Image (cartoon, rainbow, N blue to C red):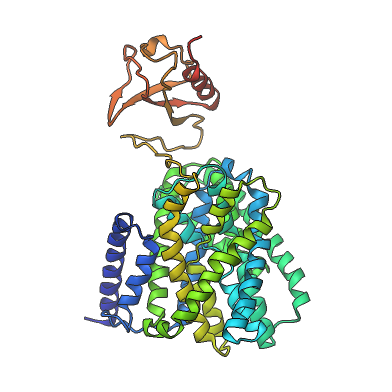
Amino acid sequence: MSSIEHMLLAASILLLLSVLASKASAKLGVPALLLFLVLGMLAGSDGPGGIYFDNAAWAQSLGVVALALILFSGGLDTEWGSLRHVIWPGLALSTIGVLITALLVGVFAKILLGLSLLEGLLLGSIVSCTDAAAVFSVLRASGVGLKGRARPLLELESGSNDPMAVFLTTGIIGIMTGAGAGPLSLVPMFIQQMAVGAAVGYGIGKLIIVLLNSLRLEVEGLYPVLTLSLVLLTYGGTASLGGNGFLAVYIAGLVMGKGDFIHKRSVMRFHDGLAWLMQIAMFLALGLLVFPSHLLPVAGLGILISLFLILIARPVSVFVSLPFSRFKLNEQIMISWVGLRGAVPIVLATFPLLARLPRAEMLFDLVFFIVLTSILLQGTSIPLLARLLKLEAKPAEKPGYPLELEPTAGLQSDLVSLDVPAHSTVAGRQIVEIGFPKAALIVLVGRGDSFIVAKGGTVIQPGDRLLVLADKQALAESRRILETQPK
């Protein structure tokens, strides 16, 4: 076989094993991302796979593209209503929290490893941010439910703190290599990156909605292609203008998720699948990039730095960033613990390698080990800690139906699932008797695992799920009727 055929064979096997690993992760109680990393390490030159890969530039490029698509998907799938009350605490964690973590870990690494202050701060900056792929994966795919505002805050933080870590890392590397100016010049650069990134992300998010609703593409499958091209345009264009592309794509996803556009469900499904593909590809590539034999010499130091990061630096950054946020003590402890490190620190650790800094390889191995311990220790213990802190909540289940409505231009109604409360006045009555507005049509009645085609004589039972086709006004009136209780 030619080399391309060997590459396709190896890639297909690794992808297949990764999908099976994601299925097994829930039963093993281990985050799927950790299994992806392990698969990459096993497939590498030190493992039975024997694949030699040491191209840090290629891994970095893949990581940047993957992170942009993961952040966009995360923003697209985030409920705006849950974020409104955590925007300021989230921004505080994304900026002040990242800076405090970088400083504390940097000083600790300087003392422990005998590094220069700049080298210590570089390591601290690399591991200063939580990872969107890790947080989204653990909180959304593992069935972990958290009460209150902790979960939306964690998702907002992980989606918006990458820019600060990237800025700190590249800024310190610039100072060390002489390519950048002094530390004070980083302040206006940071303001520029954040302002341009936020403005471009918001503007393009609105533009994408207008384009999707205005264009009349002949093939439905082209709509996801259009959004993909615009996401990449958002990142590349923002970076070209001196802004932060990661922040831009995340805000663009948030804006789109809040808006209404045609083929929204199919576009969201496409980007969800693409985000999973990017997570798998990125973690496999990063696993291939590391040599497991290089991790053993730094294991002891890596454990000390990781424990300092988890038990001291992260909690301090959370408590300092959230003094007036009205988060309770148990919520702040939970937020401190869910400071998962993942692909972002590993991608950032390739920057010193490409800059050919002294001790760059040691820093990369340390970062990789810190990420492994973070996902293993924190990722696997989140459900237990949530129970101990009395923050565990049953994850909201999205009921499946044998049909769905795809919004199109000119359609003002939507297909929505409404639950019938136990003490509702409609319970025990026929559909023809419950007084639903004429603009609301009950299409199906979900009862247990079965579905009933709605007819006028169908009797509504407590706990039923009604699949209702209605516009916003009729939907609000239908909810009011269902929630009415006997006097």
Residue 214 visible in the snapshot: no
| Residue at far left of view | 1
In the image, taking residue 123 as reference, residue 272 lies left or right, namely: left
Q: Residue at image x 62%, y 68%? A: 101
Residue 43 visible in the snapshot: yes
Q: Is residue 353 above or below residue 443?
A: below
* Residue 307: percent from left, percent from top: 51, 70
In the image, taking residue 13 as reference, residue 260 lies left or right, namely: right
* Residue 266: percent from left, percent from top: 41, 46
Q: Residue at image x 65%, y 86%? A: 116
Q: Is residue 58 above or below residue 202?
A: below
Report which quarter residue 36 is drawn in: bottom left
Q: Residue at image x 65%, y 77%? A: 107
| Residue at far front of view | 388
Residue sitting nearer the eye, 465 or 316: 316
Residue sitting nearer the eye, 308 or 240: 308
How many marks can you see? 0
The N terminus: image quadrant: bottom left
* Residue 471: percent from left, percent from top: 51, 26
